Image: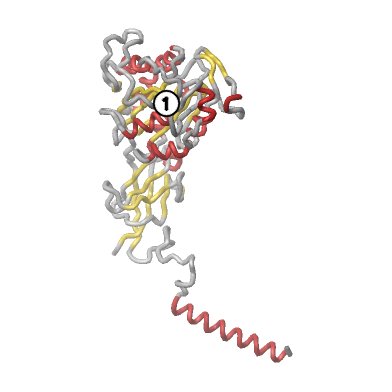
Amino acid sequence: MTNTEMGEWRLSTHRWLGVVALVCALTSCTRDNPAYNPNPALPDECRSGVEVTETFTMFARPTKLDILYVVDASGDTPAALQELFANSVAPIGGVLRALDVDARSAVITTDATVEGLAGPGKIGPSCEANTELVATLGSEQWASTLRCNLFAAPSANQYDQPLLAVQNLLENPPDDFLREDARLLVIVGMRSDDCSAAGPLTGPPRQACAQADLLGIKALIDAWGETRSLADTALVAFAGPPSAVAGEEARPVCSSTVGSAMAGNRLFDATRLFDYGRFHSVCTDDLFWPLADSIEAFVTQSPLTLCPGELTQEPLAVRVDGEPVVLGDDGFAFLGATEACPGGALRFGAPAVAAAEEIELTYCVAE
């Protein structure tokens, strides 16, 4: 091709591109652009209407807390494990009162074949007169009721299935517990690992659990989420520290006054699925401090939901104490219309609003 021909080709090409550009300018080329979004989640400016800024300085945080203890149901469990939990009851009551929460506590065993709450426990010290299943903070019997129910007779079932036992309870909530407007803290204490299986178990526990078709951890926790919000649920597990050696070859990983404990690998994995999941070794002589820390974090560093007056779409900007907050689990999410917020609700992850004093929103409203 000569220089003259090359120049004519370039001119022709430029003219053709110019025609395409003109067509795109007239049609916006939106149909051919798969990334085009006429209503972006966070528009840079209001496409119609006016900007509004709304400031929140008072936040309604959860005031109700249900605490579910899940204690080892194995027939050979030493009373020391129940004693360990029982010794923390009175000081934990002081923590809950200081946090000014409406707390209720109840107990189940790790035996998934047993329905409902454990108790009323009558075999512990001074428990003969106990008649309550649920301990209510503020009542004179709160500490004694919870202590007695922690000592409720363990099941003869050798297979510990705490995650499945909790799922069963969530699907059939008892009266006066698992309140819809309360947050839920699940506290598991055991010397073995979770053995929640898809079918019945037979034979020696360690061998049976090693060979069984165990339910997936995420599937189990997702099942919890079908009955209540996982964002308002926390799991604290006390078990043997995780180990790379699992199955029938596994050996105890620690021992203390509660006896020898096997690695709690599945329980450890389960706690990782919660914003406020905590895992601690069961081989300890004092549960108070890890429990107190977990409860305080769960209550004070809680997610927050706001109901702006005129919000109907995701906001243009969100600032907490002057700092911008972004979309995401640790930031905020636009929930759309809810029963409490017909226009639209905003939910903030706990990290975004920890110790927040002011939340400022900028969003569009129709003129």
Quarter holding residue 142: top left
Q: Residue furthest front?
A: 202
Q: How many neighbours does mark 1 have within 10 angstroms: few (below 14), some (14-19), or many (20 or more)?
A: many
Viewer-nearest residue: 42 or 231: 231
Quarter holding residue 98: top left
Tell me if residue 366 comes above or below residue 339 in the rendering. Answer: below
For label 1, the SS is strand
Viewer-nearest residue: 268 or 139: 268
- For the C terminus, the quadrant is bottom left
Q: Residue furthest bottom?
A: 4
Identity, as a three-letter code, of the amino acid under mark 1: Ile
Q: Residue at x 34, y 14 (%)?
A: 148
Q: Residue at x 33, y 49 (%)?
A: 345
- For the N terminus, the quadrant is bottom right
Tell me if residue 329 comes above or below residue 279 in the rendering. Answer: below
Q: Residue at x 38, y 30 (%)?
A: 166
Image position, residue 88 (x, y; %): 41, 17
- Name the residue tied to disc 1: 187
Viewer-nearest residue: 81 or 329: 81
Q: Is residue 297 visible?
A: no
Image position, residue 169 (x, y; %): 34, 30
